[in-house]
Amino acid sequence: MMITLALSKGRIFEETLPLLKAAGITVLEDPETSRKLILATNSPEVRVVLVRASDVPTYVQYGGADLGVVGRDVLIEHGVDGMYQPLDLNIARCRMSVAVRDDFDYADAVKQGSRIRVATKYTEIARQHFADKGVHVDLIKLYGSMELAPLTGLADAIVDLVSTGNTLKANHLVEVEKIMEISSRLLVNQAALKLKREPLRRMIEAFASAVPK
Ligand code: PRT
Ligand code: MG
């Protein structure tokens, strides 16, 4: 019985390694140097597939992978239909925030009830956040480099992930609202949970025992 785990390269892969180790699993190849998309592990029954972070839920939902690790940001944007989420893995932590140019008076714009132009990759999270606040926004969908939008006049504000805050600072942007804390979740395909119940249950338990505080 083969178990397939979908991970994205970079921080999610790196921060999932200690959890795999707790389950006795070591990945035999380094995604930064190998071009392979399917990585073998020391266990003949477990393999890792490398996909884009935003494709992890799709792989798990349709059974291309039995398990996946994905940021709460990606999960909210994608939706969670047909997937079981047994664990908050508490890895790849950051926050989702609203940021503006340091010379833009956000509080005043909100108070005046002006329409605010917001650029973001996270349109679902942004839509919900501003609707809850009763703030009128025009959302502009971007796929990356959100920080550029307020600097070029494309938007008044951005909704983006912030970790150290260095990226905002380097682009003369300031964080004006924290929307939510973000960490990565374990996703499990529901059919796999029935068909591969025992090995999956063992992996989920090992992961749970190794979740960082
Ligand atoms: O990069 P790619 O387009 O392939 O996909 P991705 O950006 O979705 O993947 P990746 O690996 O960059 O991020 C995977 C997950 O890590 C995200 O879905 C988040 O849940 C989580 N995560 C944690 C982060 C960060 N921290 C983070 N700091 N994702 C992105 N960032 C970016 C942020 O967008 C901003 O550009 O880092 C920059 C800010 O960092 P600071 O430290 O300067 O504040
Ligand atoms: Mg990225």
Image (spheres, rainbow, N blue to C red):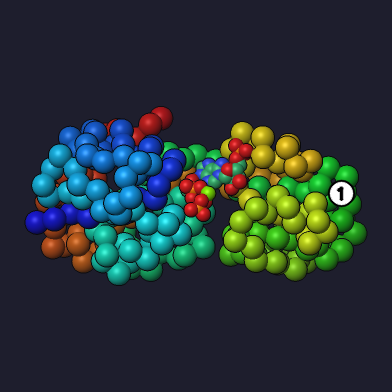
Q: Residue at x 39, y 50 (%)?
A: 8
Is residue 81 placed above or below 171 in the rendered structure? below
Q: Is residue 88 left or right of residue 176?
A: left
- Would residue 156 be visible to someone looking at this image? no
Residue 122 figure quarter:
bottom right
Residue 49: give x, y in percent of width and height.
29, 54
Quadrant where the C terminus is found in the figure: top left
Q: Nearer the viewer, residue 8 or 58?
A: 8
* Residue that numbered label 1 is attached to: 104
Give the residue type that dot 1 points to: Phe
Q: Position of residue 118 (x, y in %)?
A: 73, 61
Q: Is residue 151 above or below residue 82?
A: above
Q: Is residue 94 left or right of residue 33?
A: right
Please give left or right for residue 88 compared with residue 182 in the image.
Answer: left
Which residue lies at the image location 43% right of the left edge and 43% below the top edge?
Answer: 10
Q: In which quadrant of the rendered view does residue 207 lie?
A: top left
Tell which of 168 and 210 is nearer to you: 168
Point 38% across, 37% down: residue: 15
Disc 1 Cβ-to-ligand 1 distance below 8 Å: no
